[in-house]
Amino acid sequence: MRQKLHQLLQRAQRNRKALFLPYICLGYPTYAASLECAKAALRAGATVLELGVPFSDPIADGPTLQKATQISLDNGTKFADVFRMIKDLRKAGFNQPLLVMSYLNLVEQYGWVRFARELSKVGGGGAIVPDLPLERFENPKNILAQKALSLIPFMAPTSSPDRVKMADAQGAPFLYYVSVTGVTGARKTLAPGLLAALRGFRGKLKTPIVVGFGISTPAQAGQVGKMADGIIIGGALVQLISKTKIFQVGKVVETFCRQVVKALNNANS
């Protein structure tokens, strides 16, 4: 799965066709509903899926995701449920790479070796850990690599040239570029200077760039898709789910994701 993830992102970089990597909050509004949302996103053409594990102190999350993760925790969602979801998605016939997005505390409590073993066993693709410093990247990266799993580094508008170079040197399938200096959440406009920053990276970094935080609409995704290799939407999807009756969430998520995929396909055509 690690090789497949690399191949998908390298092809996107080479062809200048940005991929869609939506975020689904595990257990929100219920486990069954989040599973249906995940299936809907994959049916709609998501190339990769991020499965967010709820945490009681989500420092990078805005109000929308904080509320969703708290509801998920109140529902009794456990860390191990992410393996259950990946297993359920594989049983349903979906073969896209599935990444676990989790805060460092949860993974360390579970144990990196155990995490890698269980994730590999169910067919996961790797992990995104937003509060894992690059200085501590090597050991968990190597543990995951032994199971053919990936660990995704972060960059931000505030990253120094040395840190950008450090992130690029990790050999990851992609770099997660945080488009804003703030928390997740839907925004009416793109972050000032985002497109110029991405333009500056093009041709200078060997690792494909996927942009997250603050992208809310298919139109915004299409704009960013002209400069990035992938787009992540999380807060806007969770917000959409929060306004939808539970029996309709799959249909609504699929419709939204199809619109994003269409916008990305049209971005460089």
Image (cartoon, grey):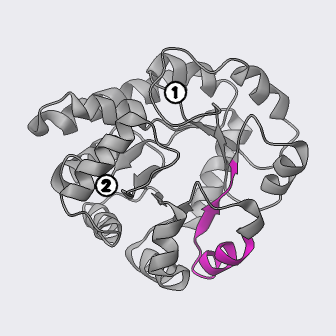
Task: Please indicate, yes or no, whether residue 149 appears anywhere in the rendered image.
Answer: yes
**Figure check: 74 above or below 249:** below
Decide if residue 59 is on the left or right side of residue 81.
right
In percent of the image, x 38 and y 41: which residue is there?
65
Q: Does the segment drawn in magenta span residue 129?
A: no
Identify the secondary structure beneath mark 2: loop
Quick one: label 2 or label 1, which is nearer the N terminus?
A: 2
Tell me where the magenta segment starts and ends, as one range: 137-154
Residue in the foreground of this view, choosing between 28 and 60: 60
The mark found on residue 215 in the picture is 1
Q: Secondary structure at mark 1?
A: loop
Q: Position of residue 207 (x, y in %)?
A: 76, 49
Residue 19, position as x, y percentages in the image: 55, 38
* Residue neighbourhood size for the residue with mark 1, other residues' Cα within 10 Å, grouped as few (<14), some (14–19), many (≥20): many
Q: Nearer the viewer, residue 207 or 142?
A: 142
Name which residue lies at 25% across and 53% down.
72
- In the rendered picture of this protein, how many numbered marks are placed on residues? 2
In the picture, measured across the screen, residue 178 lies left or right of residue 25, that is right
Residue 252 % position (x, y) = 23, 30
What kind of residue is marked 2? Leu
- Horizontal placement of 58 versus 223: left or right? left
Q: Is residue 151 magenta?
A: yes
9, 49: nearer the viewer: 49
Label 2 Cα crowd, 10 Å radius (few <14 / some 14-19 / many 20+): many
The percent position of residue 199, horizontal first and vertical second, equals 79, 26
- What residue sits right under mark 2 in the picture? 26
* Whether residue 269 can be seen here: no
- Residue kind at label 1, given as amino acid type: Ile
Identify the image quadrant of residue 147. Answer: bottom right
Q: Residue at x 70, y 24 (%)?
A: 194
- Quadrant holding the C terminus: top right
Q: Is there CB contact under 8 Å for labels 2 and 1?
A: no
